Image: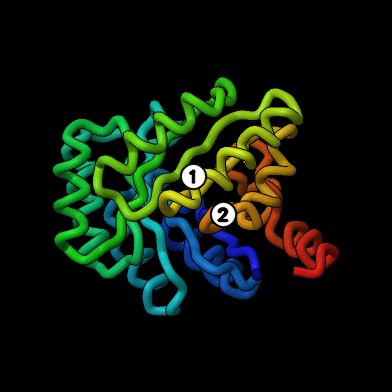
Amino acid sequence: MKPRICVPIPCRSASEALPLIDDACKAEADLIELRLDYLDDIGDFKSVTSYARDLGIPVIATIRSRSHGGFWKRSERSRIKLMEEAAHLGVEYIDVERDTMDIERIVEKLKSIGVKVIVSHHDFDGTPGLYILTSLFESMKGTGCDICKIAVYARSWEDSLLLLTFTVNASKRGKVVCVSMGRFGLPARILAPLYGSEYTYASLSYEQQTAPDQIPIDRLRQVYTALGL
């Protein structure tokens, strides 16, 4: 199997975002994540989203809240409204956090527009045990989403292996994306797609990381080539 790679686009303005989208396409990203919470002028989101959509690359629209490591500065109501507007623009996926208020209703509304929904959870402190990860996954599936994304911080090599164990088990019960952040999470970040994760994340460069220790896509491709993938 060929591992799928998603490249986040930290787009502070349309003029900055469009070349980054081009770079992601040239790097043969399988999909891109538009981090719309990075935008200084939220009015730029339509041009950025439409540009990416017209290139034909699958798009995840993400408006990450501050509690999950994002930069959204406006109200929660306007954040949800922007998700709905992005869905109407024809992106393939919307990423919404698990602890968002009325998450089930929001998932249902977004899916009714015709977009697939990724419900995500981020733990920047550590990696929970298998029981907690499994319970978390089951509760996320209960929202009616299409994909469950779980991103945790690895504080040891064992944490990385633990997440891979969870990934192979969870992927048998539903679509999941698993990300292990931090230096010790690198093995899981690289290998997660081989263990059942729908895709993994890679940055365009070290300067454009949107999570701790994201590996650049060119380096990740080199690793996959060395593995014969």
Residue drawn at x 41%, y 64% is 59
What is the number of callouts on the image?
A: 2
In the picture, measured across the screen, residue 7 lies left or right of residue 102, that is: right
**Snapshot quadrant of residue 158:** top right
The spot of residue 67 in percent (x, y) is: 39, 26
Q: In the image, what residue type sits under mark 1?
A: Ala
Residue 2 sits above or below residue 87 on the image? below
Do residues under tags 1 and 2 come within 8 Å of each other at their CB atoms?
yes
| Viewport quadrant of the N terminus | bottom right
Could you say which is closer to the camera, residue 215 or residue 193?
193
Mark identifier at residue 196? 2
Could you say which is closer to the camera, residue 50 or residue 64?
64
The spot of residue 25 in percent (x, y) is: 57, 73
Residue drawn at x 82%, y 63% is 227
| Viewport quadrant of the C terminus | bottom right
Q: Residue furthest top?
A: 125
Q: To which residue does mark 1 refer?
A: 170
In the picture, measured across the screen, residue 2 lies left or right of residue 22, that is: right
Q: In the image, what residue type sits under mark 2?
A: Gly
Could you say which is closer to the camera, residue 108 or residue 28?
108
